[in-house]
Amino acid sequence: MSDQNNILFIMMDQLRWDCLSCYGRSVIDTPNIDRIAAKGVRFTNAYVQGSSCGNSRASFYTGRHVRSHGATWNDWPFHVAEWTLADYLKPSDTEVVLLGKTHMKPDAEGMKRLHIDPLSAQGKALSNAGFLQGEHDDGLHPEGPLGRYSKIDPKYNQWIKKQGYEGGNAWLQWANAVEDEAGVARSGFFMKHAHLPARLPSELSETAYMTNRAIETIDELADKSWCLHLSYIKPHWPFVVSAPYHELYQGIDLPEAIKSEKEREDPHPIYREFMKLGVAKVFSDDRKRQHVMPAYLGLIKQLDDELGRLFKHLEEKGLDKNTSIVITADHGDYFGDHWLGEKDLFHDSSINIPLIIHDPSPAADATRGTVCDELTCAIDLIPTFMELVGQTPLYHRLEGRSLLPILHNKDFQSEREIIVCEDDYGRLPVAKTLKRTPYNARMTMAYDGHYKFVHAPGFDPMLFDLKNDPQEFVDLGRDPGYAQVRYQMQEKLLDWSATLRNRVAVSEQMFAEGVGKSLRQGILPGFWSEDEVPETRKIPTSAGVF
Amino acid sequence: MSDQNNILFIMMDQLRWDCLSCYGRSVIDTPNIDRIAAKGVRFTNAYVQGSSCGNSRASFYTGRHVRSHGATWNDWPFHVAEWTLADYLKPSDTEVVLLGKTHMKPDAEGMKRLHIDPLSAQGKALSNAGFLQGEHDDGLHPEGPLGRYSKIDPKYNQWIKKQGYEGGNAWLQWANAVEDEAGVARSGFFMKHAHLPARLPSELSETAYMTNRAIETIDELADKSWCLHLSYIKPHWPFVVSAPYHELYQGIDLPEAIKSEKEREDPHPIYREFMKLGVAKVFSDDRKRQHVMPAYLGLIKQLDDELGRLFKHLEEKGLDKNTSIVITADHGDYFGDHWLGEKDLFHDSSINIPLIIHDPSPAADATRGTVCDELTCAIDLIPTFMELVGQTPLYHRLEGRSLLPILHNKDFQSEREIIVCEDDYGRLPVAKTLKRTPYNARMTMAYDGHYKFVHAPGFDPMLFDLKNDPQEFVDLGRDPGYAQVRYQMQEKLLDWSATLRNRVAVSEQMFAEGVGKSLRQGILPGFWSEDEVPETRKIPTSAGVF
């Protein structure tokens, strides 16, 4: 065994935690993921910091809250001075590699201002959330009247073409399409086709492709220490999966949506608008929901099988001994819960994520197979990774806390009163209906383990008591009996926002070193006369004044 | 007259608004400044965004709140992607020039990460708050046991040496020193000497030197349009001034300190610690205060005289016709008010600044000599400057509002519910006494024109009712009768913090252009079947799926 020290950082897009069997509520089996949970720690109160794809991922990749990195929505860049995973892991010479999705766009103007060539190594890394190596594929290549959504033709398309499948955009025509009864190719976006198999066999699916790429990449990295971010697009929509996964769960007893008629009686104005969206309506229809869910579950089962293949490869290469494995998601999927679809709001169905961390070192032996219900965050991962590779987390920038003490059965002092998740809905049509400007369509959720409080400029807050209403059906945001709770939650949010790491250009060392220094460099305000100055601060006689 | 369009942006360090005679309460006359006020608009409710030197200036130079730029204290850098005045005025080819103080340090690590040479033009500008041209002199060159406070020997020192004054550090030995009765040179830091004249004549003072430099610079710039930031170190301590200014105000009736015994009865813990500082004790002693204040007033009178010389030069060159003049300060000085010295807290003596803006264009004729009591901010200046030079303010970054509508007698819609001022006291000894970490020694003040509310993590808030207690003697932060007011002020602060311009890499154009674009590029979530898709979003037939 080499002295490698690796991290396999697996993200699945839009994966609900309750679809993994190790979490105890799943109707499907995910034995390969469960095997990692049995060797590691499973977190039950892990939350994302952004409730949509882009802002959540930006927090994973920067270790900072959305408020701090400013990439508030999908495909919106953070500025070029924002550090990312690769910056943080640089001192340990860890090779940081991306395979798959980031949902980040570069800060082109920021590079131009600083005369950084976007095609230089520096520019390329800055253009892709800090990842210089690997293969970036956001896994969304549809076409519309304005052309393709993505400007990049993915390598996946070329690979499928080589396998003999005709057409310019295999993603759309083969991988995310089905054939209807008449043999016509149908886009997988249309959910009525979710019961049909994809037009490609499973071994040619995006999930299989990215797993192949992971295996190849790990082999290529040979003896180097690496952090591989394997970022699967699935089980994100389009909800289409290859045979036999498409029919594995058809006809089984599916879990009911977590919803209540009470929720529709007098909803918060923002919640009301989200309930009106097309995707919310589809998934609020139990018949349609039940038609689509087997495909979603099939995609998860396919992921688990592919991960099994990857984990087996690690074992065969002896890398299971020196590779930490992290399994998580960028957010969940309402799938009809609370009369909603997709994500964006702050119910647990959307922002509570699966998080499993396996550390192979003996220091973690005591916690294998345990469950941790601490409030934990996506932004905790970079500090955890830094400690896993032997570095000290840079807490003057990073806003999470290393979870290594939990993995090593030591005292975990998070000093965390609340976890926070944010969203910017300014670009959604609901912003117009709600008369929002580009700047005030914001929501900030604070959860202290008891109450979930949502601040939204221009509206009353939302408030849920998760101890007494774990299903989050009753909004107490306007209940006169909870004024004191709202005050306290506001205070916690103000504390949070005042203590964010905005002083990024001052390291902890710079901060500590300078204390009192200026006072010993002749800065003497507040002195009436010479005889009051202590010896340690006296003006040197050579200075020519006394 | 050329088609120049200039801005003379004058800052005086630690200048109280009530020491300018145009503000109506001064015991001294400042006729030259008053003359600009008579030609412009005088703002009575102008506030800084940071309550110490460095954080306040960083907000002036970036147009953003301390929370956003992160330069939370003196000499602490903001990161290299933060735009400054020179970036904002670049499109109009305005030459942005600095003469004097910025109190900013460069983000050395940030430049290194992006491979920016600190000695390149780019690097030099980034090293000095964005100012590439001019002369940087923070005006603090004392010496102590650890050597000199400033690493840079100012050009001022060399100039004084040329005039025949011996010694290596004229700033300390001549300009900011006096001679006692025995003929011994004494440092001006020791306030008991404030009644003695500086060792240099007024025409060799720092104030005269910087005025000379301004005149030379304006002449050198010839026909170019410019924005000259003339940033005087005075009337900041050391409180030493040349003859005859040192004795002009000795023996006159000085205003009494704004203070009340009530304030010392049960003060807020943070306020209590600031009252214990040496400088607070000196200025709380009326006799000592009265001994020092004539020197402070003399420094202001000297500034006014020098500005008179500068304004005369502008007139002689015909530049008064195309030069806007802005006169302001980075904060005030308690000078014994509220039993305090210097700055750092949020009483009006400290954070309410003089602000006078004169626009020579005919559009401003209607408002000449008027007074504006709108809540205005230091961060309003960059958008104002952008409009003065014919640019559109970049409100996706800038957090203030242009004041040009006020100058041009048009509707001013600030959408501003509160003005905010912040401080980070983490590096002061009081932080230790108050058991603060490097991250939670923060205060955030919100003022809505009626209440002043100060949030401070770990402590009760402070609250002052300025309508009924304009002198700010009664802290209602713990008064049970004001719970509702505190809730509302908290809500306003949360709204403020949620709507800060963190999405800096997304211009308003980018934001607007993309609306609905992805939907016409094939992103079709939430559709059950093909026939639901509107014509504008249909998949093109060439795509190979239907």
Image (cartoon, coloured by chain):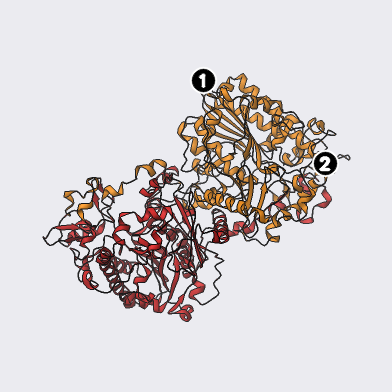
Chain colours: A orange, B red
Q: Earlier in the sequence, mark 1 or mark 2?
A: 1
Q: Position of residue A297 (x, y in %)?
A: 76, 35
Horizontal side of residue A208 vs B37, given as left or right: right
Give left or right: position of A390 versus B540: left
In the picture provided, is A290 more to the left or to the right than A483? right
Residue B177 picture location, percent across and down: 20, 60
Type of the residue with mark 1: Ser
Secondary structure beneath dot 2 equals helix
Please tell me whether residue B500 is drawn above or below residue B257 in the rendered image. above
Query: Looking at the image, which residue is at 21% across and 67% down?
Result: B242
Q: What is the three-letter code of the residue carrying label 2?
A: His
Residue at mark 1 to residue at mark 2: CA–CA distance: 49 Å
Same chain for the residues at labels 1 and 2, yes or no?
yes
Q: Is residue B336 above or below residue B366?
A: above
The numbered disc on residue A2 is 1
Image quadrant in which you'd find residue B239:
bottom left
Q: Which residue is mark 2?
A: A193
Res. B495 image quadrant: bottom right
* Count of numbered marks: 2
Near-viewer residue (A111 or B146): B146
CB contact under 8 Å: marks 1 and 2: no
Element type where label 1 sits in the image:
loop
